[in-house]
Amino acid sequence: MELELLVKGFATIMQPATFGLILLGTVSGMLIGALPGLTATMGVALLIPFTFGLPIEQGIGMLLGIFCGAICGGTISAILIRTPGTPAAAATVLDGYPLNQQGQAGRALAMAIFASFAGGFSGAIIMTFASPQISKIALQFSAPEYFGLAVFGLSIIISVSGNSIIKGLIAGFFGMLIATIGLDPTSGFPRFTFGIIDLFEGPAFIPTLIGLFALSEVFKGVEVLYTQEKVKAVKQQLIPSLADIKRAWRTIIKSTFIGTFVGAVPGAGSDIAAFVAYGEAKRASKTPENFGRGEINGVAAPESANNACTGGAMIPMLSLGVPGDAVTAVLLGALVIQGLQPGPLLFKDHIDVVYSIFAGMMMANIFMFLVGTLGIRFFVRIISVDRSILIPVIFLLSIVGAYSMRNSLFDVGLAVVFGIIGYFMQRYDFPVSPILLSLILGPLAESSLRRALIVSHGDFSILFTRPISATLIVIAVLSIITSAIRQVKLEKKLAAQNGSPPSSG
């Protein structure tokens, strides 16, 4: 029955107009994702008005193309200029950019696009056949479960701490402090805002992301503009080598399931999925010391997870009417505008539309792979541009990206401040990623913990008596212990090679 409905869904989207609009949406999404500051949410929201006069299959198909394309497109600038086009690509920077510096930008992009397709297409298949089951699990998530998920995500800080646990923890703690800026999530009382209205919602995420990753690189690039060696010649590569696929296929499969599950949990977006998958890939690796230095699994894990998250996020939106992330919240609005109410009745009354959405999601991922693969030869040319030209372009894109989110000069200043912070952190070997992870998960952890304690009247046992939250917290503790042990061994190994004592004591 499901296969028959899926075939009908493909027959619907193969109509020339629908087919063309999905392709147009995918190409547009990849361009939007590649430009820092232009998120998938923004792209979908901007183009919703153009879908009003279209049949629902065509309008939603184009929006799905933008959704899938933007998540993949964010990795292009992440790898080439160390500027994640979207928050979902932040984890890809950790190993994608080092590969670029080694003259392997083509290899990194080939694996990123292949993993994006594998994760996205597989996530769409899982969405099609497992929506009811996964939705039942996601429906059980309340405040304690969200806190457990946040703690599990924060446990990854040790995995992304580079060569020093202490410096990683300091960076993570600093990020948690920054995350407390804004209105108290429970009482609404302003904290550390100093009367600045722009800080009432906390530091805007996109300007912070751009500052830490893009502007810090600009400042570093200016410092070494005329002294740094030229980047090694790029070996263009359309598809990953068999050796890379053999090395990464287990990571891709595992990360796909992680991304789909995290996506199915309302409020847990593709950025969280990417970091969780990255941390798991590093924990499971026999050579964790290679992560952060150009490990191909460090590209495959976050890309397969964040693209699988697109399918996962659609599961609660279609099945329950609860959006899995910001983009699906906008898509939910698009469906309502078209006269459809997502939820259980959608599967009963409009099953043909549901399966055309499933088919459109799969087709968008196929287009994403084809467009991305054919475009690699053009993408890699970006790094052959003289740095005296490239650095001002990155600076301009960063400023425009920071401003475009809220049309606010305050956000531009915020990006510059975090750019300076990121520059000095790099200079003194402090990892930047723990700050980003804390900014993403800190608010979720705080609000969930406080809501859980309100429900339990201050009884912390609520976190350990609910099976899902208890399991997530136990896994987080175990992962912290195992990651710390492996990191200490790595520090001792590096210290022995360098002839200096390990930094973690």
Image (tube, rainbow, N blue to C red):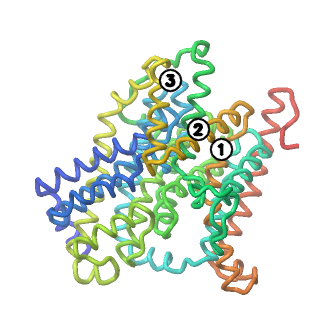
Q: Is residue 202 left or right of residue 27?
A: right
**Residue found 43% across the figure and 62% down from its top:** 326
Q: Nearer the viewer, residue 336 or 13?
A: 336
Quadrant location of residue 487? top right
Amino acid at pointer 2: Val
Picture quadrant of residue 225: top right
Q: Earlier in the sequence, mark 3 or mark 2?
A: 3
Image vertical order of residue 337 relative to residue 269, above or below: below
Q: Earlier in the sequence, mark 2 or mark 1?
A: 1
Q: Secondary structure at mark 2?
A: helix
Whether residue 147 appears in this view of the structure is no
Quadrant of the drawing holding the N terminus = bottom left
Q: Dot 2 surroundings within 10 Å: few (below 14), some, or many (20 or more)?
A: many
Element type at mark 3: loop
The residue identified by callout 2 is 416
Query: What percent of the width, then of the height, locates residue 265?
Result: 50, 69
Residue found at x 50% / y 77% = 137
In the rendered structure, are the residues bearing label 3 and label 2 in contact, judged by CB atoms less than 8 Å apart?
no
Q: Is residue 399 left or right of residue 173?
A: left
Q: Which residue is mark 1?
A: 286
Foreground of the two, 229 or 221:
221
- Image height check: is 425 above or below 64? above
